[in-house]
Amino acid sequence: MTATSGTRAATAGVQQRYVDAVMGTYGAPRLVLSHGQGSYVWDVDGRRYLDLLAGIAVNALGHAHPAVVATLADQAGRLAHVSNFFATEPQITLAERLIGLTGADHGKVFFTNSGAEANEAAFKLTRRTGRRKVVAAQGGFHGRTMGALALTSKPAYREPFEPLPGEVTFVPYGDIAALEAAVDADTAAVLLEPIQGEAGVVVPPDGYLAAARSAADRAGALLWFDEVQTGVGRTGDWFAFQGESVAVLPDIVTLAKGLGAGFPIGACLGLGAAGDLFGPGHHGSTFGGNPLAAAVALTVLDVIETDRLREQAVLVGRRLRAELARLDAVTGVRGRGLLVAADVQPGTAKTVAAAALRGGVIVNDCTPDTLRLAPPLILDDHDVEHAVPVLAAALAADHASLEAS
Ligand SMILES: *Cc1c(COP(=O)(O)O)cnc(C)c1O
């Protein structure tokens, strides 16, 4: 740490302004970043970092992707925003594309600006069944608005804001019997992340999502997958629910993070009859699905398709997991595609992530025992080769050798 003192003047100056001007919900910032290119970002003192977190599974195309930059400039120069009294071509095309990618033969989309808002929309949609109960999973994360928080089990997030909207039952994630026992004739919806992100990239046993589909069907309930983190190619499929050996099609899919690859946009997809549960006046969002956001999301889908980034995510993700598994201090590796977790010695994830950062690699300690990696889908083998020795040194507490270039 002495190696870093005196050389981070710009960072230190901006950090204090942040603390004085920005509400303290996120704690003190670890870096102050100025620009990015591909899978790398630079801080205000000129240090370069390999970004294996990508704004938490957001920057799917990395930073400053030329196609995104061109689309933003082009669409902003044409039509950035209109009220939802009017339609625009990009919004309609994006809705059609998203429904098509799910494999459903029909459905409808409500556009939002974030994941929590997509879940709010979906939560309201489930009330249109005439039932109120939602069965959700322990460890699940669905966002921080009052409704999304009501669906999120973590006591530390919930308790300061209770009472929250009610009738949410939490069951252990991955436990088919517990899920079946909780879903009944009062259940409006079953809500699951196909892979739990914030909980530490928890992959359920194969067959769990299919069992959830059956349980929902038996009770006449909707099946809702929160793919805010797992969707849009991150796991190698367009949606993580498509990665199961038994085909499962939900009624509701919520999306955000990777959809705009950095431009804020979210979506609530109602598949089949679920697409018709909202009528005029039931919901709204001023910015939701404006032509600027929709055009960017269409470009993101195009680039993922034409550059075969889902295929790349599978191959590079496999390589990344294999390399991580070889490291002594890593006790377990999980994930699919480029949503990856590495278990470390209990309680050390925070110090390991901090050491990796000093070495110029951004990873996230999503739990005290687990590192999460959700890099851009453009990550290549070269980047993996760059990252592994830094992570190895961070894990070995060989911190003296770590200093971002
Ligand atoms: C991040 C996340 C959310 C919340 O998204 P915001 O854009 O932060 O509101 C919801 N669900 C899941 C699964 C997430 O990972």
Image (cartoon, rainbow, N blue to C red):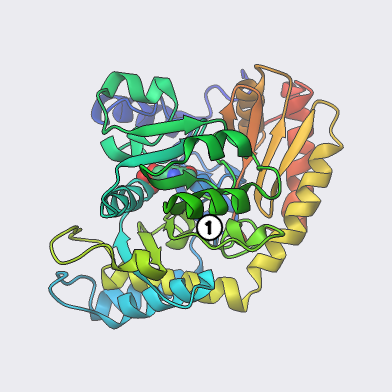
Q: Amino acid at mark 1?
A: Gly
Residue ID at (61%, 18%): 2
* 163 is higher (above) or lower (below) than 144: above
In the rendered structure, the answer to whether residue 130 lies left or right of residue 403 reads left
Q: Position of residue 358 (x, y in %)?
A: 62, 30
In the rendered structure, the answer to whether residue 403 lies left or right of residue 107 reads right
- Residue 59 appears anywhere in the view: yes
* 206 is higher (above) or lower (below) than 360: below
Q: Position of residue 228 (x, y in %)?
A: 46, 51
Ligand 1 quarter of the rendering: top left
- Residue 175 appears anywhere in the view: no
Secondary structure beneath label 1: loop
Viewer-closest of 25 and 31: 25
Image quadrant of residue 341? top right
Q: Position of residue 255 (x, y in %)?
A: 43, 57
Question: How many callouts does the rendering have?
Answer: 1
Quarter in which the C terminus is drawn? top right
Q: Where does label 1 land, which residue?
A: 231
* 240 is higher (above) or lower (below) than 306: above
Image quadrant of residue 298? bottom left
Residue ID at (51%, 66%): 65
Query: Counting other residues with Cα less than 10 Å from the Cα at mark 1, is it few (<14), some (14-19), or many (20 or more)?
Result: many
Viewer-closest of 398 and 144: 144
Residue ID at (68%, 55%): 337
Q: Position of residue 16 (x, y in %)?
A: 34, 25
Residue ID at (62%, 54%): 210
In the rendered structure, the answer to whether residue 225 lies left or right of residue 87 reads right
